[in-house]
């Protein structure tokens, strides 16, 4: 196993992790932005106002995107297991 193989393996793992977490992170960020704008307009400065909507939206996006995320991870793990023999031989 060469250094290039290790770097490629780590890079692919990070890309898959970012892709799998992106729907939840983006939806939480959008909800946070909308609530911040709402708080600025109405001058309600309650810190805990953002937590419940963010938790609900992140949970809903997790449920909605779970089939896609699991398919993404399964394809990656299958490719990883298939390449173990090739990586070990070199």
Image: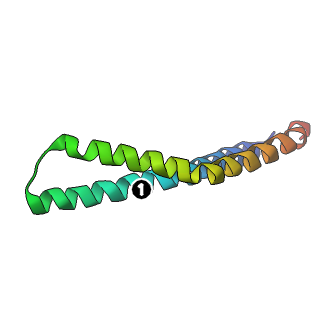
**Image location (x, y in percent) of residue 70:** 66, 46
Q: Quadrant of residue 89?
A: top right
Q: Is residue 86 above or below residue 43?
A: above
* Residue furthest top as drawn: 88
Q: How many marks?
A: 1
- Judge whether 48 appears above or below 27 on screen: above
For the N terminus, the quadrant is: top right
The answer to which of 88 and 46 lies nearer the viewer is 46
Where's the C terminus, which quadrant? top right
In percent of the image, x 49 and y 52: which residue is there?
61
Crowding around mark 1 (Cα neighbors within 10 Å: few <14, some 14 to 19, many 20+) is some
Residue drawn at x 45%, y 45% is 59
| Residue where numbered disc 1 is placed | 27
Nearer-the-camera pick, 22 or 3: 22
Q: Is residue 84 left or right of residue 28?
A: right
Query: Is 53 positioned to the left or the right of 24 in the image?
Result: left
Name the side, left or right, on which 37 lies relative to 64: left
Q: Nearer the viewer, residue 43 or 87?
A: 43
Q: Position of residue 37 (x, y in %)?
A: 20, 61
Display coloring: rainbow
Q: What residue lies at 58% left-to-right and 47% top-to-bottom?
A: 17
Of residues 21 and 52, the one nearer the viewer is 52
* Residue located at (55% from left, 53% from top): 64
Element marked by disc 1: helix
Q: Position of residue 76 (x, y in %)?
A: 73, 48
């Amino acid at each position: 196993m060469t250094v290039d193989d290790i770097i490629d393996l780590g890079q692919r793992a990070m890309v898959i992790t970012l892709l799998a977490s992106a729907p939840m992170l983006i939806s939480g960020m959008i909800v946070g932005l909308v609530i911040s704008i709402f708080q600025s307009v109405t001058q309600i400065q309650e810190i805990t106002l953002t937590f419940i909507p963010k938790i609900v939206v992140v949970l809903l996006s997790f449920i909605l995107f779970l089939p896609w995320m699991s398919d993404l991870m399964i394809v990656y793990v299958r490719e990883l297991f298939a390449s173990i023999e090739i990586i070990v031989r070199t």
